Image: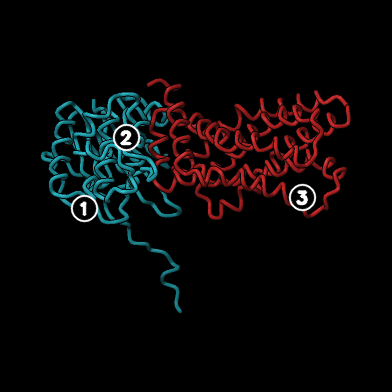
Chain colours: A cyan, B red
């Protein structure tokens, strides 16, 4: 049985159907790339898998136990990278990450994205790419089996994309799982793809009303 | 890390942020002092009148001052995406809300308590009534943080949440205001003040479990 299974997930945003009966399975070491045009619901699906968003219908199973009954428990399986980097500009990098290291040492994780020399620099002085690397460091720190990454390579330079590829490969070799959205090629070989169709054409009487 | 450790880590992070942004933190205390200082100017410097009004003035000013930082309490976390990360820490949302409420009390409630002493002396409150004022303000400020934090999480993500917030908080904390000010008034006139303080404590005891639960549900809903 697969570790993670989503069955017939549907999500409405307002009155618009964003996800229509999406199903997916994921097993240890696997990676899944979500593709689709803007507004296809890629980020929404990631938030559903993270347990942040309650799907309007469908089931979400982790080792055959329902995730939605105890979303706090499910959080231990998740490392989530959102659109935003979720860093406080007034705090240094170490202070920002301290809460998420759960008491463990930061040094090793900071080295993954080459941020050791910026450890004590306030995040407000970081560039966009450096902030993204800091947010990716938090993903590594979580030591969670399932990585949910929303456009992980956004703003990264070529060297950092290489480092991202190394980190992703290492996570998978240790039995981790990855679900990522992207518009650019990611350094992620041997992946499965899930194409989300774009917004369905609205066939609403209001659009055809005679002037 | 245990749940307790994570809880303390959230509070510590908030305290560090409050220290970094000292001007924001001091803002509510300065508002409290300034608003209190306006009353003698508006009502005239009659010592008898001010002594009469002192408990009410201090309580109302503390209530209004505690409102000021509330819309940023969760608002900044929602805007920069930190709320998602806080909810994924593995801590129940109600404990995340409680940690933020505790941080609000430490950064707003405690400075207000300290500033209330010179304010009481300035308004001519008899020294005998001062311990009762403080005994009421300690649970009173805790209630303000609990109810305020709950309301802040409920209006989170709503349009014009900043306007909605005082409209939600002020009616809910009127019991604390009534009992707290009445206790000081009783002490000033030599009447027994224990019943008022006990009712205030009872209000706090009710708010302590209920507000974090409602606050946690508000945070979950805001992240949806």
**Residue A37: where, in percent of width, then height?**
26, 56
User: Is the residue at mark 2 from the same chain as the one at mark 3?
Assistant: no
Q: Residue B190's x, y, as percent?
A: 88, 27
Spatial CA span between label 2 and label 3 = 46 Å
CB atoms at circles 2 and 3 under 8 Å apart? Answer: no
Chain of the residue under the numbered disc 3 shown in the image: B
Q: Are marks 2 and 1 on the same chain?
A: yes
- The residue drawn where x is 18% and y is 44% is A193
**How many numbered circles does the render carry?**
3
Chain letter of the residue beneath label 2 in the structure image? A
Q: Earlier in the sequence, mark 2 or mark 1?
A: 2
Give the foreground label among 2 and 1: 2
Mark 2 crowd level (few <14, some 14–19, many ≥20, 10 Å Cα)? many
Q: Chain of mark 1?
A: A
Taking B101 as reference, is A66 left or right? left
Q: Which residue is mark 2?
A: A94
SS for callout 1? loop
- Which of the numbered marks, if any, corresponds to residue B39? 3
Find numbered disc 2 in the image and state the secondary structure of the residue it sits on.
helix
Do marks 1 and 3 share a chain? no
Q: Image point 42% across, 26% down: which residue?
A: B6
Alpha carbon separation for disc pair 1 and 3: 61 Å
- Please name the residue shown 69% across and 37% down the image: B116
Name the residue that disc number 1 marks. A183
Q: Nearer the viewer, mark 2 or mark 3?
A: 3
Answer with left or right where residue B141 lies relative to residue A167.
Answer: right
On-image quarter of the N terminus of chain A: top left
Q: Residue at x 38, y 35 (%)?
A: A51
Closer-to-camera residue (A118/B66)? A118
Q: Distance of mark 2 from mark 1, alpha carbons?
A: 30 Å
Quarter residue B126 falls in: top right
Q: Is residue B216 visible?
A: no
């Amino acid at each position: 049985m697969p570790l993670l299974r989503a069955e017939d997930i549907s999500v409405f945003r307002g009155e618009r159907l964003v996800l229509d009966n999406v199903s997916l399975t994921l097993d240890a070491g696997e990676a899944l790339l979500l593709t689709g045009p803007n507004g296809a619901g890629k980020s929404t699906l990631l938030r559903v898998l993270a347990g942040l968003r309650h799907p309007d219908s469908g089931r979400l199973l982790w080792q055959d136990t329902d995730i939605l009954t105890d979303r706090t428990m499910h959080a231990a399986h998740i490392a989530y990278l959102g659109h935003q980097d979720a860093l406080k500009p007034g705090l240094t990098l170490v202070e920002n990450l301290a809460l998420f290291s759960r008491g463990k040492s930061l040094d090793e994780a900071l080295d993954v994205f080459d941020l050791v020399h910026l450890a004590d620099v306030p995040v407000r002085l970081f560039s966009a790419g450096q902030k993204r690397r800091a947010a990716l460091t938090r993903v590594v720190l979580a030591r969670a089996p399932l990585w949910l990454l929303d456009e992980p390579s956004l703003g990264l330079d070529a060297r950092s994309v290489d480092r991202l590829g190394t980190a992703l490969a290492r996570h998978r070799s240790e039995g981790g799982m990855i679900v990522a959205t992207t518009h650019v090629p990611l350094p992620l070989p041997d992946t499965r793809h899930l194409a989300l169709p774009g917004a369905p054409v609205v066939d609403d009487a209001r659009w055809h009303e005679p002037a | 890390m245990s749940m307790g450790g994570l809880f303390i880590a959230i509070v510590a992070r908030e305290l560090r942020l409050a220290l970094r942004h000292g001007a924001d933190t001091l803002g509510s205390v300065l508002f409290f002092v300034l608003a209190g200082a306006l009353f003698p100017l508006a009502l005239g410097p009659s010592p008898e009148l001010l002594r009469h009004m002192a408990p009410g003035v201090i309580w109302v000013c503390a209530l209004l001052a505690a409102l000021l930082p509330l819309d940023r309490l969760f608002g900044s976390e929602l805007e920069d995406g930190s709320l998602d990360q806080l909810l994924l820490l593995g801590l129940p949302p109600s404990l995340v809300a409680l940690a933020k409420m505790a941080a609000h009390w430490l950064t707003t409630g405690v400075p207000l308590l300290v500033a209330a002493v010179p304010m009481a002396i300035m308004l001519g409150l008899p020294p005998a009534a001062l311990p009762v004022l403080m005994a009421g303000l300690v649970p009173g400020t805790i209630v303000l943080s609990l109810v305020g934090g709950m309301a802040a999480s409920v209006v989170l993500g709503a349009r014009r949440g900043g306007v909605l917030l005082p409209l939600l908080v002020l009616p809910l904390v009127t019991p604390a205001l009534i009992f707290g000010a009445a206790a000081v008034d009783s002490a000033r006139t030599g009447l027994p003040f224990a019943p008022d303080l006990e009712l205030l404590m009872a209000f706090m005891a009710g708010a302590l479990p209920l507000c974090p639960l409602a606050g946690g549900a508000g945070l979950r809903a805001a992240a949806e």
